[in-house]
Image (cartoon, rainbow, N blue to C red):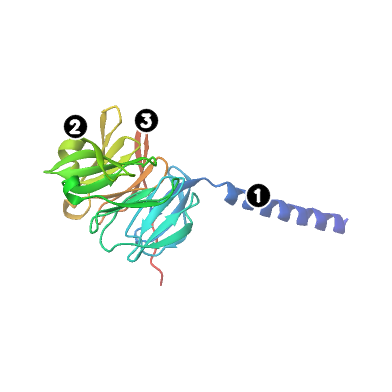
Amino acid sequence: MMNRIAVLLLACVACASLARAESNLGAPVVGVTRDSLGQLRQVYGVAGNFVLRDAIIETALNWAFDGKGGLVKTYAELLTLDRAGKVTGRRAMPRGSAILSAGAAFFPATSELWLIGKHPDRQIRIEPDALGGDVVALGTPDGRSAPLAVCRANHVWLVLVDVTSNAITRETLASGLIGDQGCAGALLWIEGNFLLARARDLIIQTAAGDERHLPFAGGAHGAQAAMHRAGDHWVQVEGEGAPPLLVLVTSDGEKSYRLPSVEPRP
């Protein structure tokens, strides 16, 4: 009898361990976010119930992740991420700032556009005079062309670059608030939709031209917020002095969630 009970207990322990392992393996990946200490982390769970995993990178200056992969800028390197948010490659890069999408990087200091991801990697230089302004956001390249949002005289222009000839093939003024105010905040261009983070609200302009507003608590002294693509339908909004937000953006609307706090290491 005692042997039978012991066997049953061992079986229960094994089942519990297997259930925990399956639970961890099956936990949905929300995306990749930067915590309040500046560390880049994988985020698991569901909306409003997030779990932050160990840091991928201790210091991430900029990043973009779309659920299939992404890019991260550190002080000295450009890193590539896979769909699980793990580092798969490291590249030396030009100094200075970088504008990122999940599959492209633009370096203002050298006016170089790097295409990285699904299509063969390519590095092209775009003449600054042809751009006629500052690149502030990147769309999704398709292997033949790359869309850029460029600030010219305080207005946002949408510029299409042929990645074979490096020539600009189309230029149009962005419509609505994005065209008029997109140079005054952090701008993201995601599958034809624009998101503009200002000091106290997020403007969402759909590909159809509809505009919605999502207010959030402003940062210190009304400083402009920063914004990064964090997942398939997720963006992270960071206001100076305010806890970082994850915002779920869908065709039905938007909803914001606070990230779990992280304590500094002793």
Q: Tell me the residue that label 2 is attached to.
A: 176
Residue at 58%, 51% in the rendered image: 24
Residue 107 location, quadrant:
bottom left
Q: Tell me the residue that label 3 is attached to.
A: 251
Residue at 42%, 42% in the rendered image: 232
Q: Tell me the residue that label 1 is attached to.
A: 19
The one of 217 and 188 positioned closer to us in this rendering: 188
Residue 240 location, quadrant:
bottom left
Residue at the left extreme, as displayed: 153
Residue 167 location, quadrant:
top left
**Residue 134: x %, y % from top left:** 19, 49
Residue at the bottom extreme, as displayed: 266
Label 3 sits on a secondary structure element that is loop
N-terminal label among 2 and 1? 1
**Residue 81: x %, y % from top left:** 45, 54
Crowding at mark 3 (Cα within 10 Å: few <14, some 14-19, many 20+): few
**Residue 260: x %, y % from top left:** 40, 53
Label 1 sits on a secondary structure element that is helix
| Comparing labels 2 and 1, the label whose residue is closer to the camera | 2
**Residue 238: x %, y % from top left:** 29, 52
Residue type highlighted by circle 3: Ser
- Whether residue 103 is visible to the viewer of this picture, yes or no, is yes
Are the two marked residues, 3 and 2, in contact with CB atoms closer than 8 angstroms? no
The one of 36 and 132 positioned closer to us in this rendering: 132
